Image: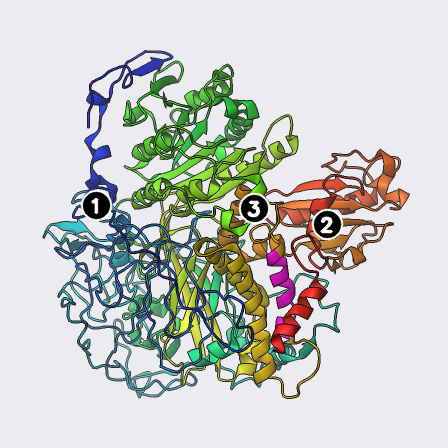
Amino acid sequence: MAQPAGPAAACRAQGTGRQPYSNGPVQNQMMHSSDAQGYNPAVPGSYSHQKVPPHQPSGQYNYSGSPNVSQFNSYQGPGQTLNRPPVAPLSGSPVQQTGPVPQVPPPALQNSAAISSAGSFPSGAGPPMLSNWQYSQSALSHPAGTPTSHLAHGTGTGSAQPSPSLSGNTNPPGSYQYAASPGGPSLQNSYMKPGSAPPPVTQPLTPLHPPRPPLGPPPVGGPPLIRPSTLTAGPPNAQPLLNSAANQEGDATSAASDGSAVQNSYDAIEGGGLMATPHPSPAPPNLKMNRNVGYSYPALPPGYQNTSPPGAPGMQASALQYPDGSKHFHQPPLGTNHLTASMGSLSLQQEGLRPVNLLQERNILPTTILQAPVPNLHEDIQKLNCNPELFRCTLTNIPQTQALLNKAKLPLGLLLHPFKDLSQLPVVTSSTIVRCRSCRTYINPFVSFLDQRRWKCNLCYRVNDVPEEFMYNPVTRVYGEPHKRPEVQNATIEFMAPSEYMLRPPQPPVYLFVFDVSHNAIETGYLNTVCKTLLDNLDLLPGNTRTKIGFITFDSTIHFYSLQEGLSQPQMLIVSDIEDVFIPMPENLLVNLNENKELIQDLLRTLPQMFTKSLETQSALGPALQAAFKLMSPTGGRISVFQTQLPSVGMGALKSREEPNQRATAKEIHLTPSTDFYKKLALDCSGQQVAVDLFLLSGQYSDLASLGCISRYSAGSVYYYQSYHHKHNPVQVEKLQKELKRYLTRKIGFEAVMRIRCTKGLSIHTFHGNFFVRSTDLLSLPNVNPDAGYAVQMSVEESLTDMQVVSFQSALLYTSSKGERRIRVHTMCLPVVTTLSDVYAGADVQAITGLLANMAVDRSVSATLSDARDALVNAVIDSLSAYRSSVLSIQQPGLMAPSSLRLFPLYVLALLKQKAFQTGTNARLDERIFTMCQVKNQPLVYLMLMTHPSLYRVDNLTDEGALNINDRTIPQPPILQLSVEKLSRDGAYLMDAGSVMFLWIGKSCGQSFISQVLGVPNYGSIPQNMTHLPELETAESIRTIAFISWLREQRPFFPILYIIKDDSPLKSSFLQNMIEDRTESALSYYEFLLHIQQQVNK
């Protein structure tokens, strides 16, 4: 790979100590070896590609209602192919795991999908290669004849993962590898196309348990007998499962296909993805621990050892205390059959079913923020349930069968905000993290204690022993009350992970900043803002004494900055050979922040002036990212890239694909990437625990559809500042400053993985968000941030007979910026119902809208924008048709909806008018793509605000009903419908659209508001481009500013406030958000309801 040092390969050194470099001598073999990428060396090169047969269209559904309108392929019923790439081979050729694989499946398979270990492939079996957005077809196993619902399933946003990802992060022997376990904070702001799990493949299993008794009072006596079962014969070409160590914590190695020992993937550390075995196995000899790895628990830590149970020291759980060997704990009943103490919840559910005639009841929008529905559970259970801001389900009553779910025509899925900033978070430090021996579920408030020594898992129903240490409650300092431990009293909890949750020492926080310094970039003035903000917040970067930082700048060449101790000023090293990028002086480019702070501050002060006279217009973004990846690979960390134009030279160069005149025609909208370079590089980054965050500050088309892949698949985030310019668009400067400060100072989790588990019988089949699916159900998140949301789609794989409740658990394993390995766990419990009316009564309309929006983005990319729009409309038609035909006892004229879904048509209409899905020429292509990115990566609360803004009248604010927060009084005006009908010329109205706010001043607005809030004498004096309210010493001004500040504080991004009048150019943007009024591209709300009614009544 080394080339003679010629003019192209020469490297010019500037600054102190000029040193020429050429590609030969400095080249680092590790940087260029495919084995160093964290992928199985059996796969040649970093990326192997094979031809893939052309895309085969998925089948469409025909059903009564609206046969002529297309549906979501992503909604899937029995027999329909999953319209997404699998991450593992399909049912005909399951990947055989060479790592720890159970010989016996656990009582509860979390998901019967084919298993793909992050280990390596058996000899001769390479991973399947799939090109971008190539969807394979595989039928789901469901009982024949069950009615299909195109709302049941959906396509994953992720395209097929290339081979490297399939083999997981198997580094060569000796290389460190991060352990990953699903339990931890939510992922860093990731804006990546969600990857997809492979289609579920139903494996017939001999049951491990006799039929489960219904949850309720615990059974008397010992646990049920467990008989080992064997897998039924698989496909003819399936190889027998290897007889290897059980999948358990601490088992950090597995045999590679070539016989060499390689570090096993996160799957082994987290344990229990799809098949974990109940059989313990000895710990590998090289692991030093104070306990046997697996299922025997350690002795009590020193602080607990003097505490002996009542009776003789060291005695077993004895018959002296409990003659029958068991002590029964009173637990409240869980399900809907035990509602005597919970009639409040029941009345809420009945309210959800009340029929509403949408054509007659026009004022259906609540005047306060819509809250999530309360599940119909016993109050003692509900008060322990997970906060819906963190974890919520589209249906708070889970249908007992897939047939019932299909009949309801509603999507089943979860929406998560797992790493959200929390004011209160119980953190448990213990050498014993109690988990189910079969499915590896973390103990939680919804398990049942059969007696003092045994607990039953609420996901797979296995009976587990209570470890000795767990008998002592450190909070109450009482022995013998395991059911009162914090782990069993909190649905959200964080564990300090012991050493067996690590495959290498926790990585240091490493931050690399990559700046575009072409002529176009310098012209925008962004570098001044970014460098100043970074200077101001350098001491607030999350980290510790190990924090490292580095800088790269680029135009048509790449510039590195040596920050070696002892230098009087930073040294700039220019690499002009962008075809074969190498790293000069790698040891001095990423330096310790505390030890080199003065040099770093010096560089940040001089950087904005260094390129002011540059006439270089080219942009070598691809080579700069390759260099950044090589620099970061040894440690992992975060790359922050600032780009202002279309990359034009080197790898990853792009050409413009936007034609403004054709923005409206669906066929011409380029929503797919034009190259797979950025996706491939992102997968390389993910394999080395590197996430890339992209800041795009551009006035011209920059092909965000292609560039966004670098963040989407590496669990990064995308920020977009359209037409950023420090002089021509100064309001964007403040937005960048505020958002960059939040970005730099918010908490961050490194080398994270997340897994979502659910009760046996339910299965997860599609993921949405920014991440990479490492094995069928393990999400790889090199960075996780508190502002990122995720969604998953689910199906009912086996009938939930005899179950009163089901549970869902997300676990996020991450390394904190202080170098601690932590696991954040959220658990949610929901009731199971058997009637269609109960399913509708518990529908969560906001969660349904959020999940449909994610599915519609996928549909836009895999099919067309018009298909996605049709599918959204059909989702409303189908559900209201099913409600009308199957639930309403008396047929009434009009458009009837259950109260729980009364806002469904309004929210879907709002989605159709949102920039991601609207038709017409208003939206620039990059703007549309960015909105789609936000849909995939925003937590639900921000997504809903962006979709359906809130409108308030603010010229008459009072303290009545106000909130009092930190000695501030925050007025709470009622929310108004989004229609011009609600505007009065003598008022002032604030529209909060999430990332932007509009304050519209009516022509006849009261003089007192104009003078006491706006600080101008009259309406005509209001400036045309006013974006700030003056802080005046008047009651009106204080109230208005307090209200706007309070709204802004509740989100991680900074909404610009535009103050507009009737003749303002921005008035059209304000009116565009009036969802209930007609626009050039969409019907009014009333017209939309008439259209829905016409289809429902067919």
Identify the residue at horizontal 69%, vertical 57% (top origin): 1075
In this image, 918 relative to 72: left or right?
right
Q: CA distance from mark 2 to mark 1?
A: 55 Å
Say what amino acid the circle numbered 1 marks.
Asn
The mark that comes first in sequence, 2 or 1, is 1
In this image, 370 relative to 476: left or right?
right
Closer-to-camera residue (444/692)? 692
Which mark is on residue 1071?
2
Check if residue 902 falls in the magenta segment.
Answer: yes
Identify the residue at horizontal 59%, vertical 50% (top origin): 915
Which residues, given as a range, are shown in magenta?
899-912
The mark that comes first in sequence, 3 or 1, is 1
Q: Specify the farthest residue to the left.
A: 259
In this image, 209 relative to 765: left or right?
left
Closer-to-camera residue (670/835)? 670
Say what amino acid the circle numbered 3 marks.
Pro
Q: Main secondary structure of the magenta part?
A: helix
> Could you tell me residue 808's position as x and y percent?
42, 68
List the residue tagged with mark 3.
Answer: 1052
The mark that comes first in sequence, 3 or 2, is 3
The N terminus: image quadrant? top left
Check if residue 1090 falls in the magenta segment.
Answer: no
Res. 789 in view: no
Badge 2 vs badge 1, beta-carbon distance below 8 Å: no
Badge 3 vs badge 2, beta-carbon distance below 8 Å: no
Which mark is on residue 730?
none
